[in-house]
Amino acid sequence: MSSGETDVTTVRLEQTQVETRVPVMFCGTYRHHVDDKGRVAIPAQLRRFLPEGSVVAPGPERRLMIWPPDEWTVQKELFRRTAETPAQERRFMRKLTGNTYPFEVDAQGRLLLSAHHRAFAQIVDMAVFVGLDTGVEISADEPSDLDPDDFTRTWDLVHQRGTSASPSPA
């Protein structure tokens, strides 16, 4: 290097995108008409958080469940882990995955509920969607009215059994 020249080093900083997962919480109750072909509009408030790879599966109490892919993996693993024998695991998985279908929505935002799913959940002309935090429940039943006294008893029971780290606001 000759005198008077400055050593210049060029540093190139690359921007990297870091994907952050925001936990999704499904909530609310929505009622939608089921047409003669078994199609029902998925509430937009729930649909926007249901990614590709979600599924419609049987759930407890004659209800259907829509599970996003991550939660579906958790549900399948629960069924596998709780089986006591390989034969029981096959039966569990057959009941669960054999009756589960991809969550596919048409251009109008409707889900086609199979005749089998509608019969299982006793859905005829109305479907009730309930956000259950990690998934969405579909049923024919209207949720029971929110009784203030019953909710207070439930609140107290939950907080009595909960940890002291979660103080009650009341």
Image (cartoon, helix red, strand yellow):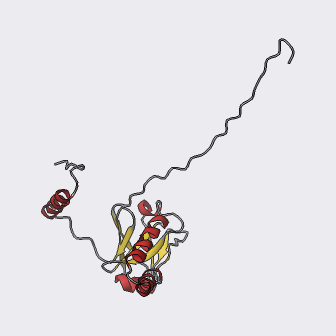
Q: Position of residue 24 (x, y in %)?
A: 42, 57
- Check the image and report above or below for 18 versus 133: above
Question: Which residue extends farthest top?
Answer: 4
> What's the residue at 54%, 71% (across, down)?
106
- Check the image and report above or below for 64 versus 74: below
> What's the residue at 19%, 50% (across, down)?
168
Q: Position of residue 112 (x, y in %)?
A: 48, 78
Where residue 45 sits, quadrant-wise, is bottom left
Where residue 124 sits, quadrant-wise, is bottom left
Where residue 128 sits, quadrant-wise, is bottom left
> What's the residue at 45%, 75% (across, down)?
56
> What's the residue at 18%, 63% (across, down)?
154
Left or right for 150, reference 43:
left
Residue 43 vs residue 51, the one in the foreground: 51
- Check the image and report above or below for 3 versus 121: above
Left or right for 3, reference 117:
right
Question: Which residue extends farthest front?
Answer: 85
